[in-house]
Amino acid sequence: MSNSSAHTAPSIPSQYLERTLTLSRQSDLLADLIRITFPADTPTKLSVQELAYQLDALRNDAQGIAQESCADLLRVSAGLGAVLRLLDYDSEDVEDNHGLHCLLTPLKQQLDAALNRVQGLL
């Protein structure tokens, strides 16, 4: 295995790097597994290949769901951002706006952090 973390920025936590592109790395590992068992000239090799193909299909499904979810989360984040900007510009009831802003800002931050974690898996 190559030491790919040697070229990364030192400020990025290693646990984040381990999760980054997890689904893409799975695809590479499954392809390696299929190559190792080719040709499938024994029942064991054939079984391993079939399992690898099934795992790859599941990975594709999970990746599609994650991508759709990220798109949905991006829209929600953009909507929350728009609401926060509207609250910043509406000066009629500053006290109520400030309270809403204080409630919505941490929610948007949590949403964006969750979105970044899911995108890191892709």
Image (cartoon, rainbow, N blue to C red):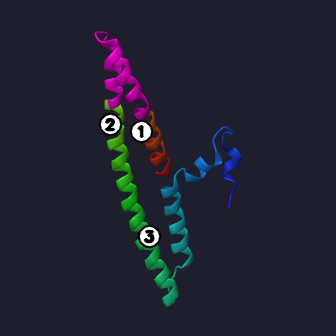
Q: In the image, is 10 to the left or to the right of 44?
A: right
Quarter of the figure with residue 84:
top left
Residue identifier under label 1: 111
Name which of mark 1 and mark 3 comes first in the sequence.
3
Which of these two is toward me, 29 or 109? 109
User: Toward which corner of the image does residue 72 lie, by quadrant?
Assistant: top left
Taking the image as shown, residue 67 lies to the left or right of residue 119, namely: left
Q: CA–CA distance between discs 1 and 2?
A: 8 Å
Mark found first going from the N terminus, 3 or 2: 3
The region drawn magenta spans: 80-108
Residue closer to the observer: 41 or 81:
81
Viewer-proximal residue, 104 or 61?
104
Main SS of the magenta part reads helix
Kind of residue indicated by mark 1: Leu
Residue under numbered circle 3: 55
Q: Is residue 57 above or below residue 45?
A: above
Q: Quadrant of residue 13?
A: top right
